[in-house]
Image: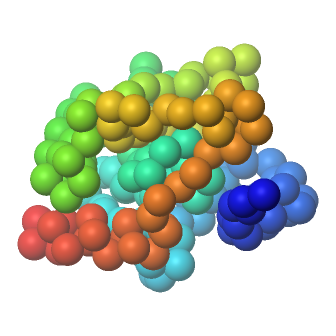
């Protein structure tokens, strides 16, 4: 029998559940902190941040969030909305160049009922997709195989973003 090891998932499974609806959510903590790599914060714009998803659905899964703790698009200023779209545009280009996916899933989960893991801090999910990236593993074993570490992904994306 083959075994797949994903030891980074243990911290997610065993960690005490935090109230990430308050201004101290992990996105706000990342924005306020100085150690972008430790917080997996791969890019900052004037009004937004890009964070690698610590528990990704697929390799290259990113979160794009406003710096401000806002739950819904209608709470954002025009400048924040425009900045989010420009950062989304940039990240799609960088992911395409560096990872060559066949497509993307891009979306928002607004509110806990819609599946938002951090309902108090809006964030876009950007998930690169490849033809054939879904196989029997998730269907039969509820297991997803990730082919790249978060450290390697950080280095890959940061190489193109440092010049911006």
Colour scheme in the image? rainbow
**Relative horizontal placement of residue 56, taking residue 43 as reference (left or right):** right
**Relative horizontal placement of residue 131, taking residue 2 as reference (left or right):** left
> Would you place residue 138 above or below residue 162 in this image?
above
**Relative horizontal placement of residue 135, taking residue 64 as reference (left or right):** right
> Would you place residue 36 above or below residue 59 in this image?
below
Residue 90 in view, yes or no: no
Q: Residue at x 76, y 38 (%)?
A: 141
Locate the N terminus by quadrant: bottom right
**Front position in the image: 12 or 163:** 12
Tell me where residue 80 appears, x and y as whole percent: 30, 38
Residue 40 in view, yes or no: yes
Quadrant of the rendered structure where residue 114 is? top right
Quadrant of the rendered structure where residue 136 is? top right
Locate the C terminus by quadrant: bottom left
Q: Which residue is drawn at 53% across and 78% down?
A: 38
> Would you place residue 76 above or below residue 17 in this image?
above
Tell me where residue 76 appears, x and y as whole percent: 39, 31
Tell me where residue 55 appears, x and y as whole percent: 62, 53
Q: Which residue is drawn at 31% across and 51% down?
A: 47
Tell me where residue 51 appears, x and y as whole percent: 44, 57
> Would you place residue 88 above or below residue 12 in this image?
above
**Relative horizontal placement of residue 59, taking residue 5 as reference (left or right):** left
Furthest-bottom residue in view? Answer: 35
Labels in figure, total? 0
Furthest-left residue in view? Answer: 163
């Amino acid at each position: 029998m083959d075994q797949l090891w994903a030891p980074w998932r243990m911290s997610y499974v065993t960690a005490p559940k935090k109230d990430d609806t308050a201004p101290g959510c992990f996105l706000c903590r990342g924005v306020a902190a100085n150690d972008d790599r430790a917080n997996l914060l791969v890019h900052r714009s004037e009004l937004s941040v890009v964070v690698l998803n610590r528990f990704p659905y697929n390799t290259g899964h990113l979160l794009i969030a406003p710096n401000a703790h806002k739950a819904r698009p209608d709470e954002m200023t025009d400048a924040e909305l425009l900045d989010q779209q420009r950062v989304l545009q940039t990240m799609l280009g960088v992911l395409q160049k560096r990872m060559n996916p066949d497509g993307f899933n891009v979306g928002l989960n607004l509110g806990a009922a819609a599946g938002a893991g951090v309902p108090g801090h809006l964030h876009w999910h950007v998930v690169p997709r490849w033809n054939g990236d879904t196989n029997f593993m998730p269907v039969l074993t509820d297991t997803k195989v990730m082919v790249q570490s978060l450290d390697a992904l950080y280095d890959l994306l940061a190489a193109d973003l440092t010049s911006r």
